[in-house]
Amino acid sequence: MASPQTAGGPAFAQGYMSSSSSSPSAASGPTSSSRQVRKEILSYSAPWPVYGLDWSNQPTEREALRLAVGSFIEDGSNKIQVITLQEFAGIDGKDYIPTSMSDWVSIAETNNQQYPVTKIKWEPYKGGHRRSSDLLATTGDYLRLWELKDDPEYDSSGGNTIGRRHPPLIRQQLAQRAVLANTKANFCAPLTSFDWNTFDPSLIVTSSIDTTCTVWNAETQQAKTQLIAHDKEVYDVTFANNNPHIFASVGADGSVRMFDLRALEHSTIIYETTSSIPGMQPNNPQIAAQPPVPLLRLSFNKLDPNYLSTFHMDSSSVQILDIRVPGIPISELRGHKGAVNCMAWSPLNTSEIATGSKARIRF
């Protein structure tokens, strides 16, 4: 699987184009006229190598400008943090006075976890009334559900400053709500990825190295179904953006497969990496079929779900697939010198995709 980004220290940066109309809600924070113009690049230096990362899905700027961050530490002391911009870290509108140059500040952190998270995601926004807490999900050894809520042991009045070096800083806690295993045995095979259904946020699908995908009901905390999805390890899984019943997966067998929750006895193979040595005839007795090249990640186009993207292990290119024309990529994107390890489709333009490698990001 792709290695976490550790070159240059455990830091990441977020590009932000400031705008006077960036706040979707007047109640979400200071007005644009009173707020200082943000820098174009906002940086956070995490205390450990960063692997998992996801934006909050809440609609207001104060809540949307929060990130969930997961560590990659080999000694069993992994963490999950929730960070926010310093301008939103104060309590009751008071200024938070930082002592570091970081643009972000941690407002919640878990206790030590034995294994790093393979993926971290916030619950999709459901709309309606504001809830008192938000949900996060992570995969690793298990599927874990976390609840972000106010910390009852943290005194925000300023009367007690024990353990609080920079008051008044808002503090919340990440409480573990559930631990879900994809098997009835005592041992759970490691989970490589998961996705939350945006049409029905009660549904989560996970992928595992034991060749299975499991669909969960997050509300009942029970598995709805488990299926053998690939011939080898499954590395990634994602729901379609336009259909609550469709999801796709990739794995070590080098295939992209699509499933329908209404008919799980069948799957559709969209793409396979298995091929023969170039230049040799199929009927040549000396032909030696190459082993399939594992596929590490896949992603549906956010605006046109007919298109998928994926990339091979240790490959510097990204394949664009059309589910209406299975078998071969309709395009191959090249531009990286190193192996690609992440990608994301634009939410604004159907033809734009960002891809990342150890050294750079391409758009």
Image: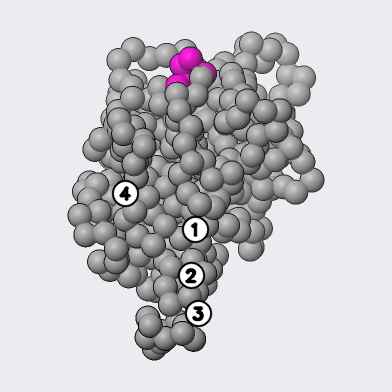
Rendered-image quadrant of the N terminus? bottom right
Q: Which residue is mark 1?
A: 253
**Dividing the picture into quarters, in which one does residue 208 lie?**
top right
**Is residue 220 on the magenta stretch?**
yes
**Residue 231 x %, y %:** 50, 52
Label 4 environment density (alpha carbons within 10 Å; few <14, some 14–19, many ≥20): few
Q: Which residue is mark 2?
A: 315
Q: Which residue is mark 3?
A: 288
- Dot 1 or dot 4, earlier in sequence: 1
- Dot 2 or dot 3, earlier in sequence: 3
Q: CA distance from mark 2 to mark 3?
A: 22 Å
- Dot 4 or dot 3, earlier in sequence: 4
- Dot 2 or dot 1, earlier in sequence: 1
Q: CA distance from mark 2 to mark 1?
A: 16 Å
Q: Nearer the viewer, residue 162 or 183?
A: 183
Q: Which residues are magenta?
A: 217-221
On residue 268, the disc is 4
